[in-house]
Image (tube, rainbow, N blue to C red):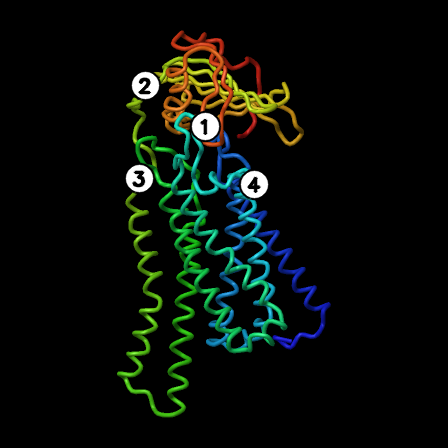
Amino acid sequence: MIYGIESRRLIFIRHLGVAVFSAILVYLFYLSYSAWGVVPALFPDWGADHPFWRAWAHAAFVLLFLTLIISPAATLWPPIKRLYSWRRELGIWFAVLSFGHGYAIWDRWARWDVARLFGFEYMEDVGGYILFRPEVGIMNMMGLIIAPMIILLVVTSFDGAVKLLGASAWKWLHTTLVHVIFYIVMIRGVLYLFYFFQYSPPNWRAYPPIWFLYVFLGMAIFVVLLQACAFTKTVLHRRGRKQKNGIIQIAAVIGIAIMFAMPLVLMTGTVAYFDNRTIKEPPEFTQAAEDYAQNFEMVIHEENQNTYIWAKNLDSAPYFRQMTEISGEKVLNQIYRYDDQTLYMEELDADMELVWSKIENVRPEDIGILEVAIETGGWAEQYGAGEHKIPFSSGELQVSIHNVGEIIPDAVFEIPEDIEFSSP
């Protein structure tokens, strides 16, 4: 056996332990992005899918981190060598979580469409594909590159592979691929967590906070610093057996270790520097350059779900209401009143009953009014009243536009009297 473990029962218990740990990680990451760190009413399109696939990815990174630190940590502190045998289970479950993340992207984002997986959408009007989401294509291309490496690590994580390849070749293969995967994951993570989720013109789209960014960077720096320290200790110890290390030799080895860690240190420093200087709130609400209707009423039809949208005075004193019905039953009702600077919400509670809550001191940009104006208001201005099939990132939307340009009655945005508000 690779680790001298002959008990299949012990191997099973370890896999079970790592599996339970992995499940807890996924669940906690999911909660952190779907409940703890996000006010759903302020991000009505931040559904269950995005926190779901993000949870798998972040949990997988934690397992990769643990896999990478065991060996250098054991070099610095020999008692940790007893954890060597856990690297196999951690690596295999890292693969499981990685492919869980990949499947979530394929099923819930791409929806089994290869073109959409890489950021493309087919436009019938032009008879070809258009790159709608280049950042999605970049991220998923990196994932596609990593996938065969992870598969190769998994299929060679057994004793038969060691006998077939030889111990030195097996070790070289796993060490090399794990580090290549680590650096690709780091680049992918920095692009995703930092570059693709910042406020940027023209829409100044607001995103929920990504608390994992600095944890992610800190874990990466810890890995390379630990490896650099282990490298320094190993080289100096081996040299010390033959001859005494001079100051120049020690400085040279330390310099090599520093250069080893430098790429991630520079990347982390750059991200931290600019993250402290980028705006954390979008600019004050201003009129968009695109043409859009100031007042409109429409219904968006999606299978058994209908989303009703009313908008009024989008440029000056915006009022907005969005109501969602599934199979004819109301499940969500959101009303934003500019005069109150308050967002009122009627949504299902844990007992599947509709209850009201409210968030005060909410500015128009906090709920993405500018994006509403550009997107749904743009549809109203472009297509006018009637039934329309409108191209969208996930295909076509069936939209019924009932009113364009006419003043929406105040009664549409009124809040029922004598209601009790719960905490949002």
Name the N-terminal-most of marks 1 and 3.
3
The total number of labels drawn is 4
Q: Are marks 2 and 3 in contact (CB under 8 Å)?
A: no
Check disc 1 and give the amino acid type: Phe
Taking depth in this image into account, of 37 and 8 the one nearest to the observer is 8
Check disc 4 and give the amino acid type: Asp
Check disc 3 and give the amino acid type: Ile
- Bin the neighbour count of mark 1 within 10 Å (Cα to Cα): few under 14, some 14-19, many 20 and up: few
Q: Are marks 1 and 4 in contact (CB under 8 Å)?
A: no
Using the image, tell me which numbered label, if any, was put on residue 128. none
Name the N-terminal-most of marks 2 and 3.
3
Residue under label 3, please give it. 279
Taking depth in this image into account, of 298 and 136 the one nearest to the observer is 136
Real-space CA distance between mark 1 and mark 2, rounded to the nearest whole angstrom: 18 Å
The percent position of residue 155, horizontal first and vertical second, equals 59, 64
Name the N-terminal-most of marks 1 and 2.
2
Check disc 2 and give the amino acid type: Asp
Q: Secondary structure at mark 2?
A: loop
Residue under label 2, please give it. 291
Q: Nearer the viewer, mark 3 or mark 4?
A: 4
Using the image, tell me which numbered label, if any, was put on residue 392. 1
